[in-house]
Image (cartoon, rainbow, N blue to C red):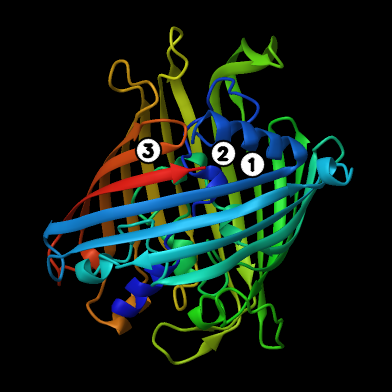
Amino acid sequence: MKRWCKLSAFFGLVSTATRLFGAPPEPVQLPVPTLGLGTAINQEFTKLTKFGITPFLAYYGVFQGNPVGGIQQRTAYSHLVLFGTTLNFDKLLGIPGGSLMISGAEATGKNLSDDIGNINNVSEAFVTPLTVLFYELYWKQMLFDDKLELRLGRMTAADQFASAPAFGLQVSGGINGNPTSIFVNAPQTFTSSPNATWAASAKIHAAKDIYAEAGIYQASERLGKLGYHGLSFAINGDDGELVMAQVGWEPTFFKTPETASFKKNGKKTAVEGTLGLPGDYIFGGYYSNFKFSELNGSKIQTNAYGFYAMGQQMLWRSVADPYTNFSLWGGFTYSPQQDISLLPLMGFAGTIWQGFIPRRDRDQLLLTYLVSGFTHSAASLGGNPTAEHVLEVSYAIYLTNNYTIQPDIQYVIRPNGTDAVKNSLVIGIQFLANF
């Protein structure tokens, strides 16, 4: 049981620095980001960004305890720090649409799920024991008026595939920012931060609100081994490939125009935008030719595949205050090969109520439900697991554009899909900082 729990925990976090707080689309915002560290620093940062260099730093810290249930009652702290820079070669060297991403990570902490015994890691911030890792290094090229996006280099599949905007909000690693099932069913292939592999991808906008994308990623047994610190760039003969593909529809219903004015060079500049009820709908799948052990340990299979569907839709938005809104989201994953897929079926759903408390229109009340169904072949691992359920209530308190505090409560029903361990109550708080 712990083997699978740790595997899920290691790959439980997928939330990038540029998508730190995955709220529904906001009304028109300032076109140039700032660090929020004082006027002088903001001015220098703006100059650097205009020159073509945009550094970033993101911190995710989670402190939790399980006063009830689990294997034993414990507390745990974990954090992840992502840092790096984007080099805009359009501004630096006059290469239209070209940019280079370079990043690294530092992580530490304890995995509370080891003390609970569940498969959906309760902390999104736990990704690995204490270490520093080299992370991303890829070139992005935009073509044809940004209708075509190409990427090549060291990347993670989870940053581009199988994720809706709402998935970046939860404290639980069970859905933040991808479903646990894909990580568990395709280990050493479907990767998340802070682990990158050689990859190439393409995304094309067939219409304004319809897109299709596909990518191929290196699969390797070296993935996640701390001794390499993210610097194993080799491609060996026994490595495999992971192919991802998805189509998406991003409609906005009941559109209304919006105009905001900002000061630029001492003068006010009008910025046009659109309000309405945005949605995000995704259908995709994966295939890997890597080596996968059957759960009973008898054979090795060389192919794995699966499918996913997910969506998010804003249902209501206040006319008086566009920041106040209500959204629903949900979806499922399906991996039919039950001999090698521990979680062949996983479902998830939730709500986002932004502005739930009057005069706090940036705060978000989050309700989340996850169910992870175990394969019949999991009986060979012991305990005859069926399904693990997770209920989560969370309230994200918006402090500034850079800081968020998030109290969180999770209730884990049938940890690891069995009744061998009592249901667990998890109480915690998450702190997020983004610069």
Which SS class for mark 3?
A: strand
Q: Residues within 10 Å of mark 1 (few under 14, many from 20)?
A: some
Q: Note whether residue 34 is visible.
A: no
Amino acid type of disc 1? Gly
Q: Position of residue 430 (x, y in %)?
A: 31, 47
Look at the picture and state if 364 lies above or below 118: above
Which SS class for mark 2?
A: strand
Q: Note whether residue 52 is visible.
A: yes
Q: Which residue is mark 3?
A: 404
Q: Residues within 10 Å of mark 3 (few under 14, many from 20)?
A: some
Name the residue nearer the viewer: 42 or 84.
42
**What's the mark number on residue 313?**
none
Q: Which residue is mark 2?
A: 281
Look at the picture and state if 158 lies above or below 238: above
Residue drawn at 63 percent across, 37 percent down: 45
Query: Which picture quadrant has residue 51?
Result: top right
Look at the picture and state if 237 lies above or below 317: below
Q: Position of residue 386 (x, y in %)?
A: 27, 66
In the rendered view, does 171 fall on the left or right side of 229? left
Which SS class for mark 1?
A: strand
Look at the picture and state if 216 lies above or below 238: above
Q: Position of residue 24 (x, y in %)?
A: 49, 31
Amino acid type of disc 2? Tyr
* Label 3 – label 1 distance at C-alpha: 29 Å
In the rendered view, does 15 fall on the left or right side of 1? right
Point out the frontmost of discs 2 and 3: 3
Q: Which residue is mark 1?
A: 248
Mark 3 or mark 1: name the one nearer the start of the chain.
Answer: 1
| Residues marked 1 and 2 touching at CB (< 8 Å) | yes
Which quadrant of the rendered structure holds the N terminus? bottom left
